Amino acid sequence: MAQNSPTWYDILGVARDASPEEIKAAWRSATDKFEPGSGTGQFRLFNEAADVLLDPDRRAAYDADLAAEVEPTPGPAPTDVEPAPDVEPPDVEPPDVEPPDVEDAPAAESASGPGLLAVLGRFNDYAIAALAVLAVASIALMVVLGMRIQDRVAVADAEPEATATAERALTAVLSYDYQQMEADRDRAVRFLTPAYEKDYLKTFEELLSTGPEGSPGPAVKTKAVVTADVLDIGVADSSRDLVRVVAFVDQTSVKGDAEPVRFQNRVVATMVLRGDDWLVDKIESY
C-alpha cells in the first residue's frame, strides 16, 4: 500500500482496534446509503474493506503490512575531512628511451589497418546480438500484454453474465410455496454446483421432512409461501471464472391467512464458471 493512502479502516470510518461488530455495523451503515443501481464502484470498495477486516487471518496480515510501513531513516552525515596539504612533486628526470623502429611495428597495429577493422567487426557482432535480445524481449512483452488484455476482456465479459445468473438463482433459491415444494426445489437446483447442492438439499429437506408419525413438514404445516425479490445487485470482486456478488433481497412470507411479513436480507453469492454455465457455489447472509 502506498504511504498516505486511505486504509480499509479509513474507508469504513472505524478505528484500527475496532471489533468485528463495529466493523459490520459501519459496513451496513455505509452500504445502506446506496439506492438500487447506483454507486457500484463505492459499493464494491466498502464490500472489499469489510471482507478483509471481518476475516481474522486476512485482517492480521493486513495489520502487519500497515505496521511495516515506516519512514526511511536518513544515512549518517558526512564527517568533516581536512584537505591534504600542498606537496610539490619531486623532480624526476625521465629515462632515456629509444624511439621504436617503425619498420619493425606490425601492420595490424597501424591506425587504419586491419586492427581497427577487427574492432569494428566485433562491435557489429555485439550490436546484432543486442538487437536480437531486444527483439525477443519485445515479443515476450507483447505476449504478456496480449494475455493481460485477454484476461481483462474475459473478466469484463464474466461480470454481467454471472450477475444476471445470480439474480435469477437468488430468486429461485430463496423462494418456495408449500403447495409445490418439489417443483421449487428442482428449479433451484439447476443453478447450484454439485457441492453446494448437497448443502441446499439438506436445508430444504428440513422444510419437507415429516415427523415419526407422518406429520407434515414445517412449510406444509404452516402453509408458508415465501417469495424473494432482488432489489439491487453488484459485483464485489471477480476473476475469469469466479465472481462474487452482493445483493439486497426482500423476502415476503405469508403463512396461511396471516398478514404478510417482510424481511430485508443482504447476501453474498459466489458464482463459479462450470463449462459454459455460471453456477452458485455458496450463499452467505449478512
Image (cartoon, rainbow, N blue to C red):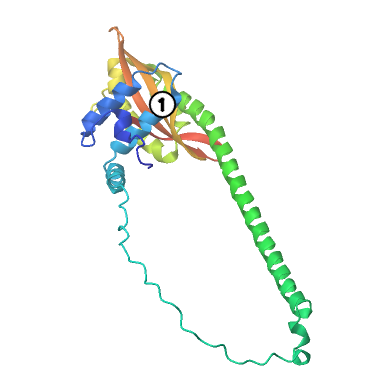
Secondary structure of the residue carrying numbered label 1? helix
The residue nearer to you, when weighing 137 against 155, is 137
Q: In which quarter of the image is residue 56?
A: top left
**Left or right of residue 263, residue 108 in this image:** right
For residue 227, above or below residue 153: above
| Residue at screen point 40% across, 72% down | 86
Q: In this view, does 253 lie above or below 215?
A: above
Does residue 210 appear anywhere in the picture?
Answer: no
Q: In which quarter of the image is residue 151?
A: top right
Q: Which amino acid does label 1 sit on?
A: Gln
Point out the image quarter for the N terminus: top left
Q: How many marks?
A: 1
The residue lying at 31 percent from left, 13 percent from top is: 262
| 191 shown above or below 86 | above
Q: Residue at x 41, y 76 (%)?
A: 87
| Quarter in which the C terminus is drawn | top left
User: 92 or 26: nearer the eye?
Assistant: 92
> Residue 139 location, x and y as percent?
66, 54
* Residue underneath mark 1: 42
Q: Along the line of sight, which residue is nearer the eye, 76 or 259? A: 76
Rendered location of residue 98, percent (x, y): 67, 93
Q: Is residue 159 visible?
A: yes
Q: Kindly indicate the quadrant of the structure image that contains residue 49.
A: top left
The residue at 64%/54% (across/down) is: 138
Q: In x, y percent, where is residue 110?
A: 76, 81
